Amino acid sequence: MQTAARRILIAEDAHVIGQVLQRNLEQEGFEVIVAHNGTEALEALDANLFDLVISDFQMPDINGDELCRRIRASERHANVPIAFCTAKAYEFDTEDLITELGISHVFLKPFSIREVLEFAHTTIERACATAS
């Protein structure tokens, strides 16, 4: 029996980073949608269910902080794992952010794509096991 591809939302305004994440995650068998700002991410969340959200922290329009707050306030997506990819991690307390927003992980730019892939597999597998 074939299982459905796990769906990941990437919210990233830097097009090259979004493309790199998308290409590598798709090569690992994930279905990936890339949103280039917070508004596009919210539209994607309205139209789809996701197993993981990976978001930039600093984006135009709606930043990652506000996007995360809206996801957590949504009944439909409140429990989806969220990771931030940011170059701004030194400007805030990462542990407080994880606790306050229910973030699963913060990747510091430049990040290792292998670390992101491992995180995606582990996080989605754990979420699926918990849901079973």
Image: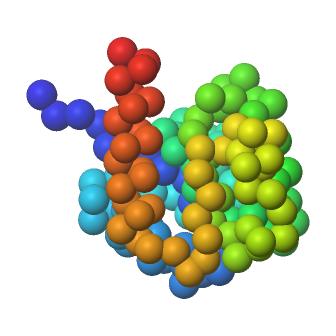
Work out whether residue 65 can be spotted. yes
Is 110 or 66 nearer to us in this picture?
110
Q: Residue at x 69, y 29 (%)?
A: 78
Is 53 or 84 nearer to us in this picture?
84
Q: Is residue 112 left or right of residue 121?
A: right
Is 111 or 95 nearer to us in this picture?
95
Q: Residue at x 48, y 50 (%)?
A: 8
Q: Residue furthest bottom?
A: 16
Residue 75: x %, y % from top left: 72, 23
Residue 115: x %, y % from top left: 41, 64
Q: Residue at x 61, y 71 (%)?
A: 108
Q: Residue at x 51, y 58 (%)?
A: 33
Residue 86: x %, y % from top left: 68, 70
Work out whether residue 37 can be spotted. no
Residue 46: x %, y % from top left: 68, 39
Q: Quadrant of residue 39?
A: bottom right
Q: Is residue 82 left or right of residue 50?
A: right
Q: Residue furthest top?
A: 132
Indicate how the structure is coloured in the image: rainbow
Quadrant occupied by the N terminus: top left
Q: Is residue 79 left or right of residue 126?
A: right
